[in-house]
Amino acid sequence: MSIELADRVYEAAFVPELWPDVLEQLTQVSNSAAASLVLFSDRGPPKFVATDLIAPVLEAFDAADGWQRSEEVQLLFSMTPPAAFIYDADYFPAEALESNHLRLDRTRPLGIGGQVGSFVFMPTGEMALFSTERWQHNDRPSGDEMARLNGLRPHLARAGLVATRLGLERARGTVSAMEKMGLPAAVLTSTGRALAVNTLLEAMPAVFRPAAHGTISIGDAEANGLFQRAVEAMRRRVDASVRSIPLQARDDRPPLIIHLLPLQRSAHDIFGGGDILIAATALSASSMVPSPTLLTGLFDLTPAEARLASTLSQGVALKDAAAGSKITIKTARTYLERIFAKTGTRQQSQLVALLKGADRVPTP
């Protein structure tokens, strides 16, 4: 076991972009074809990083919902994991391996055979799977190859634990920085569970309320419906029609807009655990008219919808606004329905009242 490689493992714990290089070296010391690191958790779909040969296979596997469909993956959570690297044919039932066509149909053409892997359960609830892919002509690993991998296993486990904790600290650092800018903010998992919340957001219990399983809900029922649908759309990796959710003014606070920003998942944040950043922006009361550009940024309106909304906020009737935009009244009504859905309003008077407060808010 190379001392230099062990040092690289610990370095990757602090600099996640080094994991591909560490995995490449893992293939060399074990005479393997490829290697990968997959992190399973209850926060959403697994995250992974891999060497170049196997990375497209994992990406296709992920796109085909292989993590949910594979019998092999399901067995990971029902069988007792060995405290060592193990050859897959010595661990999984043969029928489970042979039925995993989502993997086999992609690996066999590459000359890849079985796998040697090790599961590491973290105290934080995650499970890290370190896996090497064997060449078909050199499928069963030798005793020396297994010894080299198992010599590295304690280092991989410790590095995984450190990286997991650092990921959570990065999430806390993000919301703390936004607090200094005066923005209430939180980092959520893809299931909506809060990983980090700053004190500005905690100080708004009437707006942001704790819910089951550590999740967050919005105090206003209609806004909460939009919020939950947006979180669900981001969890399913589909385009969310609404990611900026308005809340009308109350006696104790000005009108607000709650923004949901997706946090990109890649090798750079494999252990971060955060998938969604939410931030609340207060609107300033004003009689000025918000620009279409501002409305596009605040409410995810299309340019045509934003132009119509901006015109309506001046008190112009819908028929006249349609004529001024050179669109039919039928098209204008269609745009207005979409604007209502995206701004959480139901009537033109509500929409105008909301937009009147949006003139001094910087576009996010």
Image: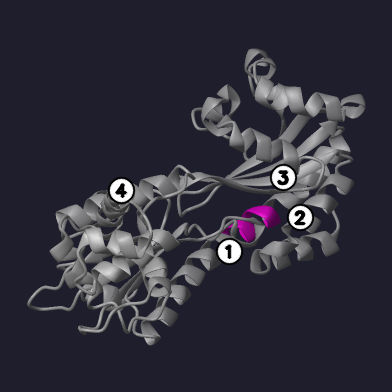
Q: Nearer the viewer, mark 3 or mark 1?
A: 3
Task: Give the mark, 3 or 2, whose residue is nearer the N terminus.
Answer: 2
**Image mark count:** 4
- Along the horizontal axis of the image, is 48 left or right of 78? right
Q: Looking at the rendering, which quadrant does residue 106 occupy? A: top right
User: Looking at this view, is 23 or 254 the one in front?
Assistant: 254
Query: What residue is pinned by disc 4?
Result: 334
**Residue 251: x and y, percent?**
7, 77
> Is 24 inside the magenta-drawn segment?
no
Q: Which residue is denoted by mark 1 in the rendering?
A: 162
**Residue drawn 69% across the image and 57% down it:** 155
Dot placed on the residue nearer the N-terminal end, 2 or 1: 2
The earlier-in-sequence mark between 4 and 2 is: 2
Q: Which residue is found at the position 68% from the left and 38% from the top?
A: 58
**Which one is in front in this view, the residue at disc 3 or the one at disc 4?**
4
Q: Nearer the viewer, residue 154 or 197?
A: 197
Query: Mark 4 to mark 1: distance in Å?
Result: 52 Å
Does residue 104 appear anywhere in the picture? yes
Q: Disc 2 vs disc 1: which is toward the camera? A: 2
Query: In whole angstroms, how far apart are the C-alphas of marks 3 and 4?
Result: 49 Å
Residue type indicated by callout 1: Val
Indicate the position of residue 279 as horizontal and vertical percent values: 36, 70
Task: Assign the C terminus to one quadrant of the image.
Answer: bottom left
Q: Nearer the viewer, mark 4 or mark 1?
A: 4
Front-most of residues 141 and 114: 114
Q: Earlier in the sequence, mark 4 or mark 1?
A: 1
Q: Identify the main secondary structure in magenta.
A: helix
Amino acid on which disc 4 is placed = Thr
Disc 3: which residue: 36
What residue would you read off at disc 2?
Answer: 20
- Which structural element holds mark 2? helix
Secondary structure under badge 1?
helix
